[in-house]
Amino acid sequence: MPVATLTLSSKNYSSWSLRGWLMARLAGIDFVEEMVEADDASARAELLLLAPSVRVPRLTHGDISVWDTLAIGEYLNEIKPKAGLLPADAAARAHCRSVCGEMHSGFSALRSALPMNLKARFPKFTVWSRAKGDIERVAEIWNDCLQRYGGPFLFGKKPTLADAMYAPVATRFVTYDVALDEACAAYCQTIMALPAMQEWIDAAKGEPDDIEELEMEF
């Protein structure tokens, strides 16, 4: 029987839930999912970027409870060190933590302008100027990592915490038809093709509830 529970909100809209879930999948930990109801006030606040929620994602592992996606990732790395969630090399590990931290605390314009919505497609979407700066920075991070470590993932041949942190951005770029250079476009395809990502996307498409505030029309 699984000894861990991962509390999540919407699979269609919640980028933080996807990050925590993907980390758990990459770690290989056995867990069950516990979904927060769509009308839960704290979950809606998190999805609408109105307030941080300590409820999603949350990993409960025996008597240990861990929330905040970066904390979940670090905990999973501790209990599953052979999963390679962080690079073995100290310099690469520091770099990985740095780009994870930048995603965790930054890119507010990108989050606001391009909310995660796996069911939707917005061809030729017009991105406002502040969000363009965030997109350019993401592309800079991706290109730097891919060139340094050889790809196809950000830190080499295996996905790490960094790939989990940036996976929702890849989905946003697909949803909003964001133009990317060849290397970044290929990286997006690599992330979207992961079996775990396909599993998550299939589940997201089956969700019956929509949050009107996140259903943009242009």
Image (tube, grey):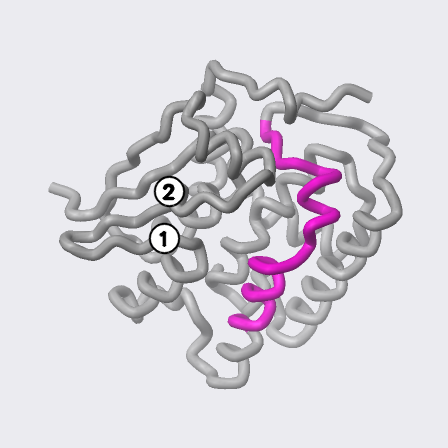
Describe residue 113's horizontal placement relative to residue 171 as left or right. Answer: right
> SS for tag 2?
loop
> SS for tag 1?
strand
Quadrant of the rendering where the N terminus is positioned: top left
Crowdedness near tag 1: few (<14), some (14–19) or many (≥20) residues, C-alpha within 10 Å: many
Whether residues under marks 2 and 1 lie with C-beta atoms below 8 angstroms apart, the answer is: yes
The residue beneath circle 2 is: 55
Residue in the picture at 52% in, 79% down: 94
Residue in the picture at 67% in, 40% down: 172
Tally of marks: 2
Q: Name the spot of residue 63 as percent of width and height, x first.
A: 15, 54
Residue 127 magenta-highlighted: no
Region of the chain picked out in magenta, as a range: 96-118
- Name above or below for residue 159 compared with residue 31: below
Image quarter of residue 216: top right
Q: Name the spot of residue 127 as percent of width and height, x first.
A: 84, 40
- Name above or below for residue 42 compared with residue 67: above
Q: Name the spot of residue 74 as percent of width and height, x first.
A: 37, 66
Image quarter of residue 98: bottom right
Say which label, 2 or 1, has the lower sequence index.
2
Residue in the picture at 71% in, 58% down: 138
The residue beneath circle 1 is: 67
Describe residue 55's horizontal placement relative to residue 141 as left or right. Answer: left
Crowdedness near tag 2: few (<14), some (14–19) or many (≥20) residues, C-alpha within 10 Å: some
- Principal secondary structure, stretch drawn in magenta: helix
Image quarter of residue 175: top right
